[in-house]
Amino acid sequence: MPACPTYVLWGDEMDSPRGRIYMIKKAASGDAPVDARFRQHMDNCLGCMACMTACPSGVEYNKLIEPVRAQIERKLPRSMGDSLFRTILFKTFPYPARLRFLALPLLVYQKSGLRSLVRALGLPKVLPKRLEAMEALLPEMPQSIFHQLPRRISAKGTVRRRVGLLSGCVQQVFFPHVNAATARVLAAEGCEVVVPHGQPCCGALMLHTGLEHEAAELAKKMIAAFEAAEVDTIAINSAGCGSTMKEYGYLLRDDPQWSARAAAFSAKCRDISEILCELEPVAPRGPLKLRVAYHDACHLQHAQGVRDQPRRLLSSIPGLDVVEIPEASLCCGSAGVYNLLEPDAANELGSRKVENLLTTRAQAVASANPGCLLQLMNGLRRRGLQAMPAFHLVELLDASIQGYSEDQLLSGEAQNLSHNQRGSA
C-alpha cells in the first residue's frame, strides 16, 4: 500500500491496490455493482505498477486492472463531456499525421510569443482543468515536425546487430531529436538500424484505459510491420510503449492466428538501455562534467523490471555524476494520459517529484520516457525553474559519443548541431 501513489496522497483503502483488488473481486462475484463509484476508484489508479514491484506474493496487478477497465468501458457509459475529451485524445495522440497537423498552430502559438502572453495573463486558469493541463504540458514544438528518420541507418564499422526502431506517435512528432539520438547511438555501437514503414501506434494508451479491442488491432499491425523488416531486436525508447509491446503475447493469447506471432514479437522487444547494456561498448565516450538526477519511469522500472541498465549506461559517461531522487519508486503523475484525465492528482504527484528532485542539487534531470519528461518540465515550470533541463538518457549518451561539451548540451546547442546529422545518422 505505501508503494501506491494514490494511497500515499489520500490514505484511502479503496485507492490502494488491496482496496481495488477487493472491489474487483466483489464485482466479479456479483456482490458489488459496477457503478460510478467503482469506476472512480479504478480511474484513480495510475497503472504505474509500483505495487507489483513491492508485492511479496507476486500478484500481477496489470492483468487485473486492464481487463476491469475494458469491462467498465463496455458496461458503464461516461458523461458526454468525459466521452468527448477521451475521444479527442484517442483520435489524435495515436496518429502522427494528425499530431503534425495539430503541431503547426501550436508552433505558431509558441514562436509568436502568444503563449507567453496567455500565461502571463493567467488565461489558462479560466479553462476547464483538463484543457488547462493540456496547455501546461505542451512541449516545445520542434522546427522539424515533418522530419522523419531514413528507413535505414548504416552501422559504424562491423555490423553487430540488425535493430528495428520504434518511431512512436508523440515521440516522432514532439521528440524527433530523441529518435535521432537513439539511431545515432545504436549506429555508433555497430547496429544497422531499420525504421519500418507503416508502423502504427503501439496501443499503450488504449490498453491502459480500457479500449482493449482497439489495442489488439494496433498490436497486429505493429507485429506485421516489424515482421516484414526482418530485424533481430526491436529498440524502444519510450517506457510506456515498451511495457505494452512486451505484453503483446498476453494481449493476443486467445487469437489462434496471432498468439504465436505476438509471442515471438514480444521476445524481440528491448528498451534501448537493455540493448546497449547487452552490447560491449565500442564507441568512445567523451566527458560530460554534469550532475544529473535520474528519474525512473514507472513503466520501465516496475512494468518491465528495468532499473539497473539506465544507471549503468549513464555511469559509462566520463565525468557524469548520477544522483538518486528520493522516493524514486513513486510515480511522477504522468502515467500515459493520466495527467490529462486526472490533473489534480497528477499535479500533486508532479510537485512532490520536483521537490524531491530539488534536494539532489542536480543541474539536469534524465529519464527514459517522453511522458515523464513532459510531466517533469511542467512541474519545474510551476516551481519557477524553467532553467533546469530534462533529457532522455539516450541524449546524454549521444552527446558524449558525439563529443559535445556539457555547456553545449545545457544550452541546446548540441541538439541543434545534431539536427544537421539526422538525415545521415
Image: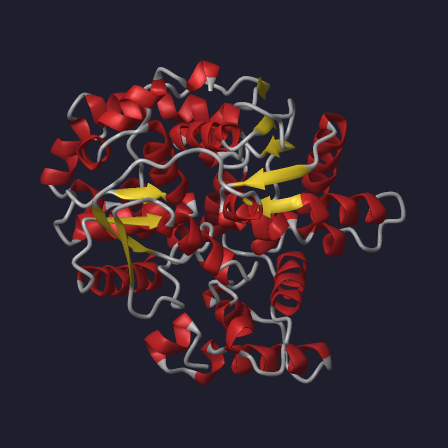
Q: Residue furthest right?
A: 256
Q: In this view, does 48 lie above or below 223?
A: below
Q: Is residue 76 above or below residue 142?
A: below
Q: Is residue 67 left or right of residue 238?
A: right
**Residue 54 spot, x, y in % from top left:** 51, 77
Note whether residue 146 is visible.
no
Which of these two is toward me, 9 or 125?
9
Q: Is residue 118 left or right of residue 97?
A: left
Note whether residue 130 is visible.
yes
Which of these two is toward me, 263 or 7?
263
Q: In this view, does 16 lie to the left or right of 117?
A: right
Which of these two is toward me, 240 or 159?
159
Q: In this view, does 380 lie above or below 323?
A: above
Q: Residue at x 27, y 27 (%)?
A: 414
**Residue 72 spot, x, y in % from top left:** 62, 62
**Residue 241 spot, x, y in % from top left:** 56, 46
**Colour convention:** secondary structure
Q: Residue furthest left?
A: 120
**Residue 92 spot, x, y in % from top left:** 50, 34
Q: Which residue is drawn at 74% across and 39% down?
A: 220
Q: Residue at x 52, y 66 (%)?
A: 49
Q: Which residue is drawn at 34% across and 44% down?
A: 317
